Image: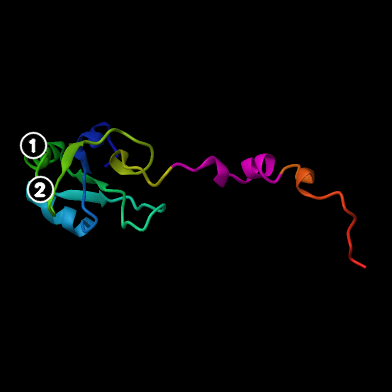
Amino acid sequence: MASKDSNKSTLFVGGLDEQVTPQVLHAAFIPFGDITQIEIPSDPTSNAPHRGFGFVEFDLAVDAQAALDNMHLSELFGRTIKVNLAKPGKGGPGGLRSGPEKAIWADEDWLKENVMGDDSHLTSSAPDQDS
């Protein structure tokens, strides 16, 4: 369902407690309509299970709007969540991002040029002592 209106059927849900899982989000949002995808991006830089936000994509934009109207500033696991229409992004269906953009240092060419390039400044001028 990758149409122009798919971003209107995808909600950003922020302020999630660490205990919130895709199953919890599904249970919280299913009363408003058929859900096609739920994504909660992980946080590789910490021990937290996720980054505190997620995306819920509905089959119909009208269902997403009903969920937004009813769930924005509601409480989930003791925290007030913020629900908004997701902004279009690069990647998966409905504008959901398929993962973080590739970091420049993850590019082998960038590493060769900027890190592993001329490393003569890293070696000492002392002769090898292999004998």
As drawn, is 74 to the left or to the right of 111?
Answer: left
- Image mark for residue 110: none
Q: Nearer the viewer, residue 16 or 13?
A: 16
Q: Residue at left 36%, top 58%? A: 47
Query: Is 56 located above or below residue 131 in the figure?
Result: above
Element assignment for label 2:
strand
Q: Residue at left 35%, top 44%? A: 92
Give the mark, 1 or 2, whose residue is nearer the N terminus. Answer: 1
Q: Position of residue 21 (x, y in %)?
A: 23, 58
**Mark 2, other Cα within 10 Å: few <14 / some 14–19 / many ≥20:** few
Q: Position of residue 67 (x, y in %)?
A: 10, 42
Kindly report the secondary structure that dominates the magenta region of the rendered protein.
helix
Quadrant for residue 96, please give it: top left
Q: Position of residue 111 (x, y in %)?
A: 63, 44
* Stretch of the chain drawn in magenta: 101-116
- The residue pinned by badge 2 equals 75
Q: Quadrant of the N terminus?
A: top left
Q: Residue furthest right?
A: 131
- The residue pinned by badge 1 equals 69
Type of amino acid under label 1: Asp
As drawn, is 37 to the left or to the right of 129?
Answer: left
Q: Is residue 81 magenta?
A: no
Q: Residue at left 12%, top 36%? A: 65
Front position among marks 1 and 2: 2
The span from disc 1 to disc 2 (Cα, nearest Å) is: 14 Å
Type of amino acid under label 2: Glu
